[in-house]
Image (tube, rainbow, N blue to C red):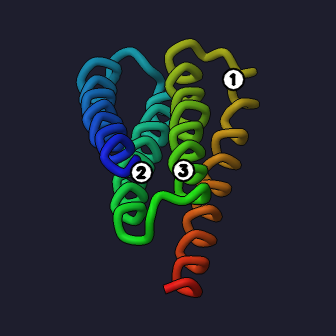
Amino acid sequence: MSYKYFAYGAIGAALAVALGAFGAHGLKETLSEDMLEVYETGVRYHMYHALALMLVALLAGRIGDTKLIRAAARLLIAGIVLFSGSLYVLALTDIKILGAITPLGGVAFLAGWGCVAAAALKAKKTN
């Protein structure tokens, strides 16, 4: 599990870099300042959580591949798709209803971080 999620995190980080470069160079003249800021927020959280996914994979190697660790990884991926993905589409299309999806991604991020904390605390008790 840890190798797979580490690879997913690395691929996600590379994608965040590519999307960030696209936003900085390809969208600067196209999007309004507000929508460019929305896009950049998506890129920033995408990168944070791609790196977090890699850390979760390393944690899995250290404390074991537990249900909590797997849940954390899946929730972080869901958060990237829902949070960052909805911000990307919102910025590019200006379809405001997509803003309703963004908080679901935020909840997935929070739940993922909660699973990481619970897994770490549980591992401490058993080690």
Q: Is residue 34 visible?
A: no
Disc 3 to disc 2: CB gap under 8 Å: no
Q: Can you tell which mark lies on residue 70?
A: 3
**Which residue does the image show at 63% across and 71% down from the upper left?**
118
Tell me the element at label 2: helix
Q: Position of residue 30 (x, y in %)?
A: 39, 15
Question: As displayed, is residue 39 above or below residue 58?
Answer: above
Amino acid found under the numbered disc labelled 2: Leu
Which residue corresponds to mark 1? 98
Residue 78 in percent (x, y) is at 58, 37
User: Where is mark 2, residue-wise?
Assistant: 53
The amino acid sitting under disc 3 is Arg
Q: Spatial distance from mark 1 to mark 3, Cα to Cα? A: 28 Å
Percent from the top left, x then y, of residue 99? 70, 30
Contact check, label 2 and label 1, Cβ < 8 Å = no
Q: Residue at 47% of width from left, 24% of height from top? A: 32
Q: Which circle's residue, 1 or 3, is located before the other in the chain?
A: 3
